[in-house]
Image (tube, helix red, strand yellow):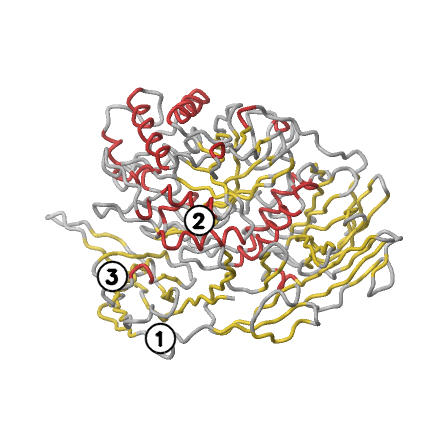
Amino acid sequence: MDYKLSLRDAAAVEARPLGEAFHSRSKDGTELSVNSYYMEKDGQPFFGVSGEFHFSRMEPWRWEDELIKMKLGGVNIVATYVFWNHHEEEEGCFDFTGRRDLGRFVKLCQKHGLYVILRCGPFDHGEARNGGLPDWLYGKPFEVRKLNEGFLSYTRRLYTEIAGQVKGMFFKDGGPVIGVQIDNEYMASSAPWEMTTGISNEWAFGGDEGEEYLLRLKGLAAECGLTPVFYTCTGWGNAPTPDSMLPLWGGYAYRPWLFYSHKGEHPATEQYIYQDYHKNGIACTDDFRPHYAPEDRPYACCEMGGGMMCSYNYRFQLPYKSVDAMAAVKLASGCNFLGYYMYQGGSNPIGKNGQYLNESQVCKISYDYQAALGEFGQVRESYRRTKLLHYFVRAFAGILCPMKTVLPEGASLIIPNDVDTLRYAVQTDGHGGFLFVNNFQDHVTAKDRLKETVTLDTKEGAITFRFGIVAEENAILPFNMDLGGIKLVQANAQPVTVLEKGGRDVYVFFIPRGMRGSFTFEEKAKIDISKSSTYVCPENFTAEEFTVSKGERSAGILVLSRELAEQMYIAGGNRLVFTDEALLEDENGLRLETVKAENHICCYPANALSGNAQGGSGGVLGEYLYRAGQWAGAGKKLSVEQVAPGRYTLDILDGLLESVKDVRLQIDYSGDIGSLFLNGRLISDNFANGAVWEVGLREFAGEHSQLVLYITPLKEGANVNVESGMAARVEEVGGAVAVLHSAELCPVYEIEL
């Protein structure tokens, strides 16, 4: 179909400083601030990309490499909950050791150039037991989340303890902590008091004192030494948002809480419909109903669905394409601060008295969350796709942040089930910009779009895009983009980043699936391989490189297929490394974390790596072969024995972890819940959703080598017979399924490049 949109009245935004409550200067003179549209660093636009990583939900030996993965994935801010009940499980006994060592975690973030937002509670939620409130608060003679002296005194003690762990680590001190969240979802949500679950099902108090509560706790945090660049609060759910705090938003398309008390069909959500979150008087179809004028504050996110856990009544496999699709929709809708929950999955600690610290509707241990990075470091498709978006916003923040959203009429009112109307939006400064196209919708089957036409009426004339796009894909297409003094009029290609090679800039693009890649430059420009100002990529190509020139100016263009682009990492500033495994970079160089013993890795420029060169892709990329050392378990099978219905023993051979970084146990089963025990201790659990369940074994090296797997049966026609004079309860089941299909060991190698 043909679509038209006028941009003649569009102009760049007029950002206004938000004052001292959103500004700080570091000891080295670096300034960080927030204006009404975006963050600034030393007066220049800074695009924040935040990823949630709960340090206490992971063994500390994994922290550093997972933070490196986040950094190479384009994340520049780490957000983390400080769960009160993880640190003061017993009243008066604080624990900041081991996996609870907040100070060590923050120092690692600083080592790798990552800013930090501390989500300090007192209430967090995060599917933690009681939302993170310690059990012992339930028995106190005061209400939680209220401005009474009892609760305030305990909150003051909590804040003082947290501040002591991160003393000297705030931005003003030269440290990485830039934000502190006060409470979470105040007056918007709560969590069950878990000691009442299954009986009275009582919930912790959700709050009723509005801004006064948040401002009082903010003042308390400052008194205790929690002094960041800015304080944050929840924006959604009609939560109070004081003027001196940064409201953070989010969006979840997969909502297990809909089924906490029953089963049912999940509706399609509004999360993949373009909005304008930065326009006063706008009517949105989602829950964006701020108490402030939208143009007075930036639209910033802390909880876009970077994954989602399964609850007992809602089992599903997250479509990983949903993550970057949502992020791109938010970006087009005016978001200049992307924040994912979760970005890094984890495993809940067990309490000191054997108590499980997750809430009862989710797994007792696992908090993998189907996140971009799994609880044992697995790299997911969502990680590969979102890093391309993160590289884009980092490279082009200067032109992107001041742009304004322009929507076609009725775009924000599209019904989620409507897969016939093209979903598109524009970000522009009045001259150039980006056309955003989304063809993903949750809980609806999208369809390939073969022939679409969008004409943008700009001040410099009409620009027409003709393209196709496959189902579940999204795209960002540039128009009137300045490439070092050469105008790219339009391209059916998505920009990723810009590198320096041989004294000139090289702009990197990829082709979204379903499109035929093409570039049209201004008429005065000439492309070396086409001898004109236009270029069309060959069909089924992998990588193409060409030069565009205008007079004395020239720029390199590197074009990649979507498949190859998803393997791309920016390493060392000006080189690209291509692998579908996890790339790590630190002060000692590059490492590869891989489940493959033999790895073919490409790079750009072609000589950017050392090792056994294997040729390249048309001369554009260099290709190298890297092999891992011999694994002690190669060729050996896991010994599995069924010892009772649904119960199995798994004998892990000694020495299998000696020559590798980790070994993941991969369990394929049918049933209700999988529970894995070591010496009678639950070490991992899983709600069956049809996916292979993975458990990292490095944490348990040196312990007894036999594991016990119990599969709770999926029961048909179950009921409980209580007709007995002795109050006996007997379950009667018509049929049950609890079957282990396979259990295999997958080594995780680490190779220096």
Which of pointers 3 and 2 indicates the residue nearer the eye? 3
Q: Tell me the residue at 28%/36% (across/down).
A: 134
What secondary structure is found at the residue carrying circle 1? loop
Left or right placement of residue 481 versus residue 593 in this view:
right
Q: Which residue is mark 3?
A: 678
Q: Residues within 10 Å of mark 2 (few under 14, many from 20)?
A: few
Left or right placement of residue 751 versus residue 279 in this view:
left
Marks 1 and 3 sit apart, C-alpha to C-alpha, by: 20 Å
What secondary structure is found at the residue carrying circle 3? strand
The image position of residue 156, as x and y in percent, is 33, 26
Q: Which residue is mark 1?
A: 633
Which of pointers 1 and 2 indicates the residue nearer the eye? 1
Identify the disc placed on residue 264.
Answer: 2
Residue sticking out furthest to the left: 726
Q: Amino acid at mark 2?
A: Gly
Q: Tell me the residue at 77%/43% (across/down).
A: 432
